[in-house]
Image: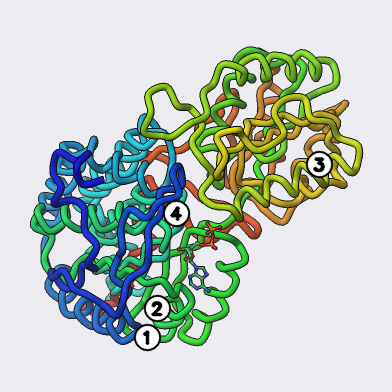
Amino acid sequence: LKSLLKDPTLLRTQAYVNGAWIDGEGTFDVINPARGDVIAQVTDLTRAQVTEAIAAAEVAQNDWAKWTGKERAAVLRRWFDLMVENTDDLATILTAEMGKPLAEAKGEIGYGASFIEFFAEEAKRIYGETIPGHQRDKRITVIKQPIGVAASITPWNFPNAMITRKAAPALAAGCAMVARPAELTPLSALALGVLAERAGIPAGVLNIVTTSDASSTGLEFCENPTVRKLTFTGSTAVGRILLRQAADQVMKCSMELGGNAPFIVFDDADLDAAVDGAIMCKFRNNGQTCVCANRIYVQAGVYDAFAEKLAAKLKDMKVGDGMEDGTVFGPLINEKAVTKVRSHIDDALSKGAKVAFGGSQHNLGGTFFQPTIMTGVTQDMQVAQDETFGPMAPLFKFENEDEVIAMANDTIFGLASYFYAKDLSRVYKVAEALEYGIVGVNTGIISTEMAPFGGVKQSGLGREGSHHGIEDYLEMKYICMAV
Ligand code: ADP
């Protein structure tokens, strides 16, 4: 991997704590999912070392919070510039440890960097408020202050952007952060640490703690009273555990959890646009995103045509190593992911659905899977309730609007939803009726640093991105002054 990089110093296997690169006890392996080989052995910090990182963050935070917004903005901007300059290397590291095609990895670096650019600017705009006094001699002022040391736990599917989406608003707000990347993909996080150091982010303000034991780090984050904010992206199951653990300290939590996105195609939709949207929405990152379409509902009149057009598009898309030119579908992250896709397909088949395209593991072997379309899928099948997190598009048939809204909302999740339609009153009605934090209308791609990303119901708490995103790292203080 080192030989593929223009700047091999971006590849680190030590953790980044208090401005130093440190070793833990032992190491854990990072595996290239396309080839199955070990590409790095990353240091494994102990819980005591995570405690030390939190203590260092507290010290650093005291000073960082005193910097003006403009001063913080300047170093964050340098961090952004360095990310952009090093896009190729960051993408290569990302593809090597996570598997997504290089073009998509570059897209993720751009997306990840955009949060730093945005929140660098936002650092200057943490406005307070003056409120008319409630008595003649009283003045009311509201100021916003950094909440304190923030801790993050992030997943492997966006090894870069899930970290910047949290670190950028945290640092902009004046918080210090201790970030624990997914054990499957720590290299992208460590490369971000190298660039943060180069950008002049002071020692201790951003710490990258690599650990193989997620639950012990999660406990430390929840039990250490110095941590004032926990931000997590991952499954709802783990989110529940963390929320329970965080309850003892009444810690402020942001949770970006699982989704079960419906993608609805009405009979008045532009069908070709809907097919293109479905491809991007379902198959981006090989189906491994929490906003990927999980259930595709197609109105009866256009059902067959939609299935045919979708299959025709998939036919020409290449499955392969993400490092190779032209690859659209990389490998799945690991065997467990393959088993999940397989079980959703088998369950649907056993209940009467059919495979219209693909349906099995790819002849490349390993964790490569054929992009798959299933027809005749119904609400009683596993995929209706559970995220596949893989390249399987299940097509459900529906007759009318009320029916499809009820089916779309019949889930504990509420992150992203999508629909294609042209009738204006239908567009309004359906957008309002979907119980989701995000609704894509006539588009399959909704992620941007400019908008508030987040879910309702059991998909999470809080929002990331946009001016709302910084609020999760700020506390409001009301000052009542007698004059
Ligand atoms: P995914 O399916 O994306 O791996 P998880 O919720 O299992 O979703 O994992 C998301 C992140 O949470 C990963 O970095 C993982 O290591 C971490 N994690 C898993 N279990 C725990 C736990 N009990 N406490 C804290 N973090 C955890």
Q: Residue at x 25, y 78 (%)?
A: 53
Mark 1 to mark 3 CA distance (whole Å): 42 Å
Q: Is mark 4 within 8 Å of ligand 1?
A: yes
- Sequence order check, earlier mark of 4 and 3: 4
Which is more foreground, mark 3 or mark 2?
Answer: 2
Mark 1 to mark 4 CA distance (whole Å): 25 Å
**Three-letter amino acid code at the position of disc 2:** Phe
- Marks 4,3: beta carbons within 8 A: no
- Classify 10 Å Cα crowding around label 1: few (below 14), some (14-19), many (20 and above): some
Label 1 SS: loop
* Image spot of residue 419 (x, y percent): 66, 29
- Mark number, residue 156: 4
- Marks 2,1: beta carbons within 8 A: yes
Mark 3 to mark 2 CA distance (whole Å): 38 Å
- Mark number, residue 221: 2
- For residue 141, say whether it is visible: no
Label 4 SS: loop
Mark 4 to mark 3 CA distance (whole Å): 30 Å
- Sequence order check, earlier mark of 4 and 2: 4
Residue topped by disc 1: 224
- Classify 10 Å Cα crowding around label 2: few (below 14), some (14-19), many (20 and above): many
- Sequence order check, earlier mark of 3 and 2: 2
In this rendering, the answer to whether 442 lies above or below 305 is: below
**Three-letter amino acid code at the position of disc 1:** Asn
- Sequence order check, earlier mark of 1 and 3: 1
The quarter of the picture where residue 187 lies is bottom left
Residue topped by disc 3: 407
Q: Is mark 2 within 8 Å of ligand 1?
A: yes
